[in-house]
Amino acid sequence: MTHAPRPPQTLALPRAVATLALKDLRLMWRDRVGLVFTVWFPVCFAALFGAVLSGPGVPQRAPLALVDRDGSAESAALVARLLAAPEARAWLAPDEDHARRQVLAKRAAAALIIDPGFAKPDPPTHRAHGAAAPAALALRLLTDPSRAPEAAALRGVILPAALTARWGAPALAGPPRALIHTEPLGPGAPQLGAPPSAGGGYAVSVPQGMLWGVMGAAMAFAGSLVAERRRGTLARLRVTPAGLTGLLVAKHAACAVTCMGVCALMVLLGVGLAGLRPVDWPLLVAASACTSLGFAGLMLLIAGLATSEPAASGMGWGVLMLLAMLGGATVPRALMPPWLSDLAGLSPVAWALDAFEHALWRGGGWPAATHQLVRLAALGVLAAAAGAPAARYLGPARRGAPDT
Amino acid sequence: MPEPALIWDSVSARYGRRTALDALSLSLAPGTVTGLLGPNGAGKSTAIALAAGLLRPTSGAVRVRTPAGPLPPTHRAARAMIGLCPQSPALYDALTARENLALLGALYGLRGAALTARAAECLELVALAPRAADRVGSFSQGMKRRLSLAAALLHSPAVVLLDEPTAGLDPHARAAILDAVSALRSAGAAVLLSTHLLPEAERLCDTAAIIDHGRLLDLAPPRQLIDRHAGPGRLTVRHELGQRTVRVGDLPADLAAAAATPGLLELRLERPGLESVFLTLTGRAPRDQ
Ligand SMILES: Nc1ncnc2c1ncn2[C@@H]1O[C@H](COP(=O)(O)OP(=O)(O)OP(=O)(O)O)[C@@H](O)[C@H]1O
Ligand SMILES: [Mg+2]
């Protein structure tokens, strides 16, 4: 066996980066706790919170767009009652399309469409069978799934108003909910066998789950970079021709790939199990990519600033969790008081959620989401640029002279 | 004398306000082993970090001889020439021994069959071949150290920097590593060996550098250092009437005189070692700073 010095081999930087990134992904895969945070927790969160948002909620003074397509005295009476109702903040929209867009743009919690036939006399079959109420009213309520509690409150206001306008009495025998057809905007048609608005909540909780997964991955990678610095493997890799640049690019890439993977997994689960039907796949991919870029950049910044693993995880909780809660990854922004919702607009989590919702069900395409994508990408670049120089320092004390 | 493979040219380094290395000038010649000896905190690891490009000198320069001429160790071409065995093993516990070597080998540009063969060769060298498929997390400290050495030699570097590679090893493992160091020298590598095991350094090193408080105290072949700082030793003469001990002045003359002692039973010559040099040069108080 010979240990004679040999001329150095050449190694292209992309190859070194790929080697290092694969190493990180393999380590990530073998680190079960990190995996739990990256995958298991977001899935559970999306499942539980989706179910919560799909159920009935607390009544509020909710914004309601009204469209009168019937044009009868009865429909006018219903409009008048709703405009005057203290529980709702209602206004008249010119047509259904306009009202629908107001819901999607979050200006209304729901839109009530009074269809032609609202004032039509009951068919004789109903009276023949002695039924006290018709099978359905010609009313459709278009709802924002993220505002299910408000929609439920609105249904409670609309039904007695409609009955009074139509028959002069606020209550009739029979199942009251079936009288108004509820159409949650977003995840497409309600699932077979599920209650009418089930699935709606998942349009909100799946993007939230994606964000939790992305943040879990960012925290896991920040921790691993700090651990590598402490254990000396970072120094060992730095002295190879790949150098610190290759190392940091690889960490960043592996983190971004993991984030994308988590996003893809959450979308797959949402499509397969919760009936989600993304309306804009290219936008969804772009939103996942920009979110991953943004949070991988934050990962480098946290790793660069943290002097120890506890510091990294503390920063993860203190910064990322705060951004998450503020940005609507736990309580949706629609349920926040207005001042908090405005503040939430500063959180990258809110930017990402907004972009995901546009791609998943809100629609609106690139014009609606591009500014969020740009913000996320810019955050990623700036955070990485700020974090990478800090990661140059050697050793836990970080008092050494920086490498070139 | 061949051109040095690596030189520290009046290199200083500071951590904050503490000077860890003060104007160190030293060079490593191909085919030699240079010992780097000094108490705890003397600056050995700092000198090695500077040579490996992990730290930038606050003044002075480190130069590595490469096919493209002398370059600082932070340069890509220079990094490929250096093999570093850090003081702590610094390996991935979640990867197996073979996976650790495969990762590092790939980063040095080794690939495919060449990489596999070289990794096997290095595992053999440190007697870890039977444990190649085990995760490093399940290794003992000594095994990790041995694997760390294998990782440093994987790409057959021209300059090998070993920071206390034998610390905490059993005598067999220590002997194996020192044999490997000899083999590296014969193969033409320039080896820097930082160690606290002075008898071994004395046997193995062509040159020994003694540093303390970041300063180079002396640099010479071990024998010269001993003659210079520890004196020539003591001669004990046991004869039928008792025994006497004399400080050796002129060795041949003293030996001849001793041999002429009537009723001579035993002659014992005690030559001081590097240990005496070390204690003389650095003082006797243990270091805790
Ligand atoms: N990361 C660091 N931050 C601050 N000071 C440091 C750091 N690393 C080393 N030092 C200081 O630099 C000096 C030299 O340390 P170095 O690690 O080079 O010593 P050494 O000779 O390798 O010691 P040992 O035999 O204990 O390994 C010491 O005074 C030490 O306190
Ligand atoms: Mg040391």
Image (spheres, coloured by chain):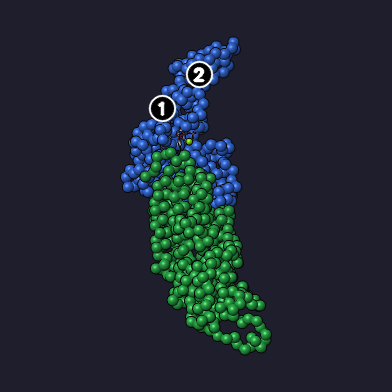
User: Residue at label 2?
Assistant: B234
| Chain A display color | green
Q: Return the residue nearer the eye: B60 or A269.
A: A269
In the image, what residue occupies the spot 43% across and 43% down? A393
In the image, what residue occupies the spot 59% across and 43% down? B140
User: Residue at label 1?
Assistant: B217
Which quarter of the figure is the C terminus of chain A placed in? top left
Count of marks placed on residues: 2
* Position of residue B194 measured from the top left corner of the image (x, y, whole percent): 47, 35
* Position of residue B124 measured from the top left corner of the image (x, y, whole percent): 54, 47
Image-quadrant location for residue A377:
bottom left
* Position of residue A110 measured from the top left corner of the image (x, y, whole percent): 51, 70
Pointers 1 and 2 in contact (C-beta within 8 Å): no
| Chain B display color | blue
Q: Is residue A236 above or below residue B45?
A: below
In the image, what residue occupies the spot 59% across and 46% down? B139
Outermost residue toward the left?
B69
Between the residue at mark 1 and the residue at mark 2, the CA separation in whole angstroms equals 25 Å
Image-quadrant location for residue A294:
bottom left
Of callouts 1 and 2, the N-terminal one: 1
Amino acid type at circle 1 is: Leu
Note whether residue B167 is visible: yes
